[in-house]
Image: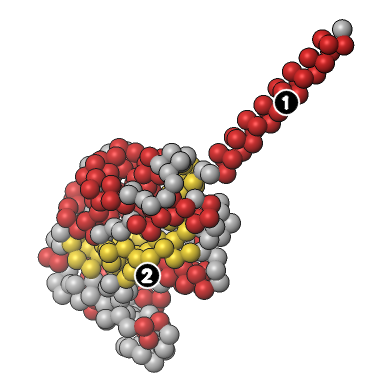
Amino acid sequence: MLKAIFLTILLLCSLTLSSFAQAMSLDKNVQKVIKLPLNNWSSQRVLSKALGTMIQSLGIPVEYKDISAQDQWGALPKGVIHLQLEVWQVSMAKDFNRMVQQGYITDLGSHKAVGKEDWWYPEYVEELCPGLPDWQAMNNCATLFSTPQSKNKGVYYAGPWDYGDGDIIRALDLNFTIHRFENDTKVWQKLEQALKKKQPIMLLNWTPNWTDSRLKGKFVKFPTYQPECETDPSWGINKLLLKDCANPSNGWLKKVAWPGLEKYSPCVFQLAKNINLNTEMIADASALYVVEKLSEDDAAQAWLEKYKKSVDKWLALPCNKT
């Protein structure tokens, strides 16, 4: 009887230790999950899915988190998300620079691609508004861009991101108002509606983007950007207000990470540093989703196949992949 009790206790202990070991193993695996943000524009979402596939090929699990570009700055320092491949200078430099200086995020370097984010219109609009792309033609044509709700003001369609567009309108005394959408999908839907009827439209656009190769259009030529435009009211046309100029034409595009990523997952950290996106790569990521109408997952897979040579090079990591 005692022997039977002893064996039973031994078996229970063994099962308990086994369960504990499995729990520890599972917990360890959970801790190694890489969490990637999905922001509200198409190239970022497709490239994040492509990055996730690359990470999974290393045997590391991935989770995706829908999060706005603004909210990601609170999530990155806490490790709620671990890595962001697309940080654009014009809309994100203030948060980026402050948080790098404070040690809240890690700068993983710049991509080869450079960006521009500004007011844009399809090329056919020049026939309706002579004088474009010069910004001074805009007020003469403001009613062309108006809606019944805008009270003869031109409407500029934009996303939820902060480009200082309201400041530009005030500083250059533009007879325009802003209509904001929650993501770029809504912006492109509005553009598609205008294209079908050849209606004038003024909207936020950027490069690299799907329009680079798929649709002829131009950025408005505002007074050329200088850093003083954002810091010295006496600079430029308006001596009282800042932002009487265009946005930077060759803005950087960067990668950033949670500060603990290098220790947490050395392979992913090195992979992120290796990735270097050019203009075509980012534009294609957007075009596959917006123009080709692929799902995000299918667009990511098509993108990985197109750029397989670069992807293989990035994945040639000098670290333990297990």
Residue indicated by mark 1: 16
Q: Quadrant of the N terminus?
A: top right
Classify 10 Å Cα crowding around label 1: few (below 14), some (14-19), many (20 and above).
Answer: few
Residue indicated by mark 2: 90
Residue 269's spot in the image, x, y percent? 44, 55
- The relative height of residue 57 versus residue 10 in the rendered view (above or below) is below
Residue 238's spot in the image, x, y percent? 36, 87
Image position of 11 (left or right of 242): right
- Residue furthest left in the image: 127
At 28% from the left edge and 47% from the top edge, which residue is drawn?
312
| Between discs 1 and 2, the one toward the N terminus | 1
Q: Quadrant of residue 4?
A: top right
- The relative height of residue 293 versus residue 208 in the rendered view (above or below) is above
Q: Nearer the viewer, mark 1 or mark 2?
A: 1
- The relative height of residue 93 versus residue 188 in the rendered view (above or below) is below
Q: Nearer the viewer, residue 84 or 271?
A: 271
At 15% from the left edge and 67% from the top edge, which residue is drawn?
126
Q: Quadrant of residue 282?
A: bottom left
At 22% from the left edge and 63% from the top edge, which residue is drawn?
121
Q: Nearer the viewer, residue 219 or 281?
A: 281
Residue 322's spot in the image, x, y percent? 46, 41
Residue 208's spot in the image, x, y percent? 26, 60
- Residue furthest right in the image: 2
Q: Quadrant of residue 237?
A: bottom left
Classify 10 Å Cα crowding around label 2: few (below 14), some (14-19), many (20 and above).
Answer: many
Residue 49 is at least partly visible in this image: no
- The relative height of residue 182 versus residue 129 in the rendered view (above or below) is above
Residue 263 is at least partly visible in this image: yes
